[in-house]
Amino acid sequence: MTIPLSRKYRQVNYIPREKHAVRKAFKRLFGVITEKHAGKKAILLYLLAFFLYIDGVYTIIDMATSFGTALGFDSTQLLLALLVTQVVAFPSAILFGKMAAKFRNDRLIFVCICAYTAIALFAIQMDKVWEFWLLAVCVGMFQGGIQALSRSYFAKIIPAEKSGEYFGIMDIFGKGAAFIGTLSVGVVTDLTNNANLGVIPIAVLLIAGLVVFAFAAREVNKFQRQHHTEQVADQEEEETAVIES
């Protein structure tokens, strides 16, 4: 699958191999964190939103079988439902890729977060096997889309020459968030002795991520408009200088 990509793709923004790579990598990472530029606020808001909503997404994916088992569902049914999730996820990811060419990424991410929030809220009252199958299909529909769209959107708002550093930070946010959802679900389930109520923290994370993402998208759009205006002004100045000369 990766052979065509490796033959045709040429990476433009990268850092060549050098001595003391680890020390210099941490130095560059610290520089990215402390630097100031016009789009920094939008990037930080988006990373916070990503931290919240992707934790909800990963928790749903990772704890699906545990949740079904706690509700007393048959293990064979659970495994088949998870298989259906993967089967549905493949064409859905392709569909989201095509939709991304026609619609703005932030709107598609907004739709995905809303869908996962609805999934979490529906799971609070779930007690039948067919409902688990329905949720498995719904999760598969948005699973690949939200992850791919999140990275694609992030790539558009960060400086291209520092993409490695920023994606490293994004990966830290994603991996670091993985324990919060599962811990919250475990604590609530243990305190209430009710697996359904244990889904409430997931819904809270997704709703919080949705709210923060709305602010992040507004900041991104504001920054992009300002950047476009500055580019147009610079181009007009260059054209005027050429005419005068």
Image (tube, rainbow, N blue to C red):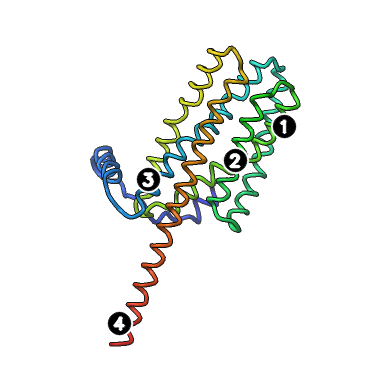
Residue carrying label 1: 134
Amino acid found under the numbered disc labelled 2: Cys
Amino acid found under the numbered disc labelled 4: Ala
Image disc number at residue 241: 4
Name the residue rendered at 56%, 30% in the picture: 203
Element at label 4: helix
Mark 1 vs 3, N-terminal side: 1
Q: Quadrant of residue 196?
A: top right
Q: Nearer the viewer, residue 231 or 19?
A: 231
Distance in Å between CA atoms under marks 2 and 3: 26 Å
Q: Of circles 1 and 3, which is in front?
A: 1
Q: Nearer the viewer, residue 45 or 149?
A: 45
Amino acid found under the numbered disc labelled 3: Tyr
Q: Is residue 235 left or right of residue 208?
A: left
Mark 1 vs 2, N-terminal side: 2
Image disc number at residue 166: 3
